[in-house]
Amino acid sequence: MGILEVKGVNKRFGGLQALGDVNLSVAEQSVHAIIGPNGAGKSTLLNCLVGKLIPDTGSVMFDGQSVLGRKPHEINQMGISRVFQTPEIFADLSVLENVLIPCFARRDGAFRMHAFETVANEGEINDQAEQMLADVNMLEKRNMLAASLSRGDKRRLEMAMCLVQQPKLLLLDEPTAGMARADTNNTIDLLKQIHADRDITMCIIEHDMHVVFSLAQRITVLAQGTPLVEDTPENIKGHPKVREAYLGEAH
Amino acid sequence: MLGLSKKDTRFLLIVIALTLLTPILLQPFPEGSGLAQFNAGYPDLMQRFAIFGIFAIGFNILFGLTGYLSFGHAAFLGVGSYSVVWMYKLLSYNILPGLILAVIVSGIFALAIGYISLRRTGIYFSILTLAFAQMSFNLAYSVLTPLTNGETGLQVYTDDPQILAGENSPTSPHLFGIVMRDNFWQPSVGGWEFTFNYGYYFCAIVAILAFYLSLRIFRSPFGMMLRAIKTNQTRLNYTGLHSRPYTLAAFVISGMYAGLAGGLLAAMDPLAGAERMQWTASGEVVLMTILGGAGTLMGPVLGAGFIKYFENIFSKINDSVLHGWFGWMPDGMEDAIISVSHFFVGKSWHLTLGLLFMLVVIFLPGGLVEGGQRIARMFRRKKTSDSDAEHHPKPAPHVGE
Ligand SMILES: Nc1ncnc2c1ncn2[C@@H]1O[C@H](COP(=O)(O)OP(=O)(O)OP(=O)(O)O)[C@@H](O)[C@H]1O
Ligand SMILES: [Mg+2]
């Protein structure tokens, strides 16, 4: 029984079957990659996990509880954090504030009326946030406006915002898209490190096969909304169906 | 000090000093000089500066921080005024019970309106608040006449109970015997005349407290969440925070500020009319906040001062005043100039304000505060000469400078 169990999920957009009978089981503390061509339904699947979309049919269980019908903030408080395909950060806030907010969310829950405290006086939370920024090599940028960061830095910032919450399950939607090669390798190292240090499960969507094969322990191939195969990286590499549906196309 | 950083303490002290010295600062021209009509240091207007400053500070907590643009905040202003006048009628002319009631009632009112309106965002939210305010305005004229006294406006009559009023208690608003409309000092120094008025100083102290509270909110985790809502509500929700209670809390706080401001209006002048709730009054506080600089601490206060100054000073400049100014010119030229400036002063002060507002929105999207910051930066740059400041990445501006 995995920490995340998706069973028989269907999602239609008008006439388009975006997800067709998806079954997925992600084992606790594993790194599970989902690959597939553009429009395969990968992001749609993640949307069904975090409460952005509600599947037409099927069930999504996380840690033994259903996530369906819960609001995004409730699902996050259960322990699921998500990095989006296009970075979702607080563009008008400073880099440090971007990381402080998830720190407060973790400590204080979904709402707290802390109008009489001062952010600067929260020593422990500030330390936590700065440590996280140091881990992603962004400490010297902490006072910059998040909007003025490069695309790669925005992604790293969003990743830091998710990681600092110490989620049980981290969902990453193309975390290295738009990054330079060196940044991509740094990200791989960071994710490896995080995975080694903490009890975290990762589910990663990625087009870059170098990233997938460096990190994943299991890979699911999605095509036209349906899982084609699920196997170890070694077997996926040589799988004829996969080559035809995905790798052949991409290369 | 007071839970503030060194920089903020200094900032607060400056604001306190400016507020307390207002009767002097707004009286820069000697009496009898041609410019004396630009003096604004008379009690009535100074009270308005402080009161509308409070209104705008509160509005800014909602609009400046969360970005939710309410078009119905005048409703709370009206509720505050009615509460105070009712306390006059029932208890006595002491303003304290009324002001407390004004804050509580407007808070409850804001909770109800906010609970419904905040289900929508953007323009739909604005329309909902506008609808509620117009509804209140119309109800005040019709069904609620027993509470509001309709078009006449609510006021105190001799046969009102006033159960707490003693034999010799003042017959106009007062705070434990200190009568609001009284002046406690009217020195005249050289050609200058100054008026120190109890009502203004009461409003000033309340305004300083209101400002301090807003400063604390700006620096708090709560304030940071509100700013986060403005820039990316989606991210906030996926970060495990429920945005609705945050926006509702901001809405209620700003409603209470508006109620307090409305209460103070009635504390200075014991009258409450429904026109205070009209949409133009709601629009005015929006203008004040944007003109001064939404989301900054000082902006709304500056904006409020600016608009009230225009409303009261520019509107008084009529043709005969203009003739006085331009009388030295040759006749044809004088008439030409006067007929042009005629469009910008006196009853047409709205036109000047409108043009000014357009200029600010187009060239200074951050409002008057941004203008001030740009000037300050120009001076600083001259001092540090052309260092490599341009090459450094842009640091996040400190909110509320
Ligand atoms: N909200 C929506 N409304 C309508 N159609 C949608 C919506 N979201 C996704 N789709 C469609 O569903 C299909 C799957 O989209 P999805 O974004 O999940 O693909 P993807 O696998 O993430 O692709 P990519 O690699 O390009 O990110 C696409 O055809 C897309 O156009
Ligand atoms: Mg996608």
Image: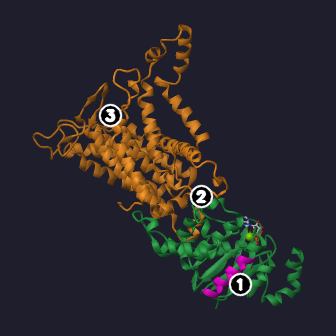
Give residue A114's quadrant in the image. Answer: bottom left
Check if mark 1 and mark 2 are on a common chain: no
Nearer to the camera, B222 or B62: B222
Chain identifier matching the green colour in the rendered picture: A
Write down the residue under mark 3.
B44
| Residue at 28% across, 33% down | B195
| Residue at 55% across, 44% down | B379
| Vertical position of residue B3 compared to residue B281: above or below | below
Q: What SS does tag 3 mark?
A: helix
Chain identifier matching the orange colour in the rendered picture: B
The amino acid pointed to by label 2 is Pro
| Residue at 41% across, 41% down | B277
Nearer to the camera, A195 or B58: A195
**Ligand 1, image quadrant it occupies:** bottom right
Q: CA distance from mark 1 to mark 3?
A: 70 Å
Residues in magenta, as a range = A185-197
Write down the residue under mark 1.
A32
Q: CA distance from mark 1 to mark 2?
A: 38 Å
Position of residue B44 in the picture relative to residue A57 (left or right): left
Q: What SS does tag 2 mark?
A: loop
Question: Mark 3 — on which chain does it sit?
Answer: B
Q: CA distance from mark 2 to mark 3?
A: 43 Å
